[in-house]
Image (cartoon, rainbow, N blue to C red):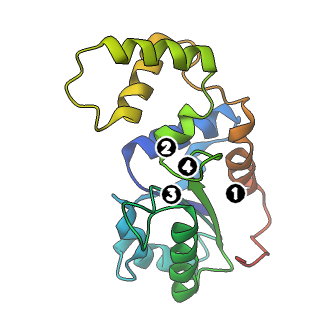
C-alpha cells in the first residue's frame, strides 16, 4: 500500500515522473498519483483530489504528499503565474487544507529563469549543441504554429536523440530527484513549509 502521494498537472507530468522514479530505481506503484488536470485546480479548496487525500490521510494510508506544479509565467497570470506566485499560493492552499505536516513542493520551471513548465525544465538540461541543431531545424521548418515552441522543441529532441531523451545526470534534476527519494524514505515529513 502506498504511503505517499504526488499531485501533478497532467498526463505528460505523470509519465515523466514515473520515468524518473524508475530511473532512480524506485517503484512508482508505491505512489498514489493524483492528476489535477491543470494548474488552477491546485488552488481550489473544493478540488476532489483534496477530499480523497484527506480520506487517505485519516486512514493513515498517506503520510507524505509531493505537489509538482508548473511555475508558468507571471506576465500571463499575476496571481498564480511565475515561481514566487505559484509557491505562495500553493503554500496558502496547503495551509488552509491543513496538509503542512505532510507536504512538500516542487515547482517545475527553468531553474535559471524561474519561469516555464515541464518542457522549459527539460530544455534546461539539453546540451547546447543539441539545442542549436534543433533551433536551426525549427528556423527553416514550415511549422505553422510556434505558439507551443517549447513543446515542439521537446518532441523534436526526443525524436532526434531517442537513446537519451533525458539527461537525468544533469544537475538541474538534482532537487527533484532528492524530493522523490525523500518520499520513499520511511520517515514522515517533519519540517513545515517555510
Closer to the eye: label 4 or 2: 4
- Closer to us: 51 or 121: 121
Left or right, 27 with reference to 144? right
Question: Badge 1 is on which residue?
Answer: 183
Picture mark count: 4
Circle 4/circle 3 CB separation < 8 Å: yes
How far separated are the C-alphas under marks 2 and 1? Answer: 20 Å
- As helix, strand or loop, the secondary structure at mark 4 comes to loop
One can see residue 46 in this view = yes
User: Which of the two labelled residues, at mark 3 and mark 1, occupies the earlier sequence position?
Assistant: 3
Question: Badge 3 is on which residue?
Answer: 71
Residue found 42% across the figure and 74% down from its top: 79
Which residue of the protein is positioned furthest toward the left in this rendering? 144
- As helix, strand or loop, the secondary structure at mark 2 comes to helix
Residue 58 at x, y percent in the picture = 56, 82
- As helix, strand or loop, the secondary structure at mark 3 comes to loop
Question: Badge 2 is on which residue?
Answer: 118
Residue found 45% across the figure and 19% down from its top: 135
Crowdedness near tag 4: few (<14), some (14–19) or many (≥20) residues, C-alpha within 10 Å: many
Residue 23 at x, y percent in the picture = 65, 31
Residue found 71% across the figure and 54% down from its top: 179
Closer to the eye: label 2 or 1: 2
Crowdedness near tag 3: few (<14), some (14–19) or many (≥20) residues, C-alpha within 10 Å: many
One can see residue 2 in this view = no
How far separated are the C-alphas under marks 4 and 3? Answer: 6 Å
Question: Badge 4 is on which residue?
Answer: 109
Amino acid at each position: 500500500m502506498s504511503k505517499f502521494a504526488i499531485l501533478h498537472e497532467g498526463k505528460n507530468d505523470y509519465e515523466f515522473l514515473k520515468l524518473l522514479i524508475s530511473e532512480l530505481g524506485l517503484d512508482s506503484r508505491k505512489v498514489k498519483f493524483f492528476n489535477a488536470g491543470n494548474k488552477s485546480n491546485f488552488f481550489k479548496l473544493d478540488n476532489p483530489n483534496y477530499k480523497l487525500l484527506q480520506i487517505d490521510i485519516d486512514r493513515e494510508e498517506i503520510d507524505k504528499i509531493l505537489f509538482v506544479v508548473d511555475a508558468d509565467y507571471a506576465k500571463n497570470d499575476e496571481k498564480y503565474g511565475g515561481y514566487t506566485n505559484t509557491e505562495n499560493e500553493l503554500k496558502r492552499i496547503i495551509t488552509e487544507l491543513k496538509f503542512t505536516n505532510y507536504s512538500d513542493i516542487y515547482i517545475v520551471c527553468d531553474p535559471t529563469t524561474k519561469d516555464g513548465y515541464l518542457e522549459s525544465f527539460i530544455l534546461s538540461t539539453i546540451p547546447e549543441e543539441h539545442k542549436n541543431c534543433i533551433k536551426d531545424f525549427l528556423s527553416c521548418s514550415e511549422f505553422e504554429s510556434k505558439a507551443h515552441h517549447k513543446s515542439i522543441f521537446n518532441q523534436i529532441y526526443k525524436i532526434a536523440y531517442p537513446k537519451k531523451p533525458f539527461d537525468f545526470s544533469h544537475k538541474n534534476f538534482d532537487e527533484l530527484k532528492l524530493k522523490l527519494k525523500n518520499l520513499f524514505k520511511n520517515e514522515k515529513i517533519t519540517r513545515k513549509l517555510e
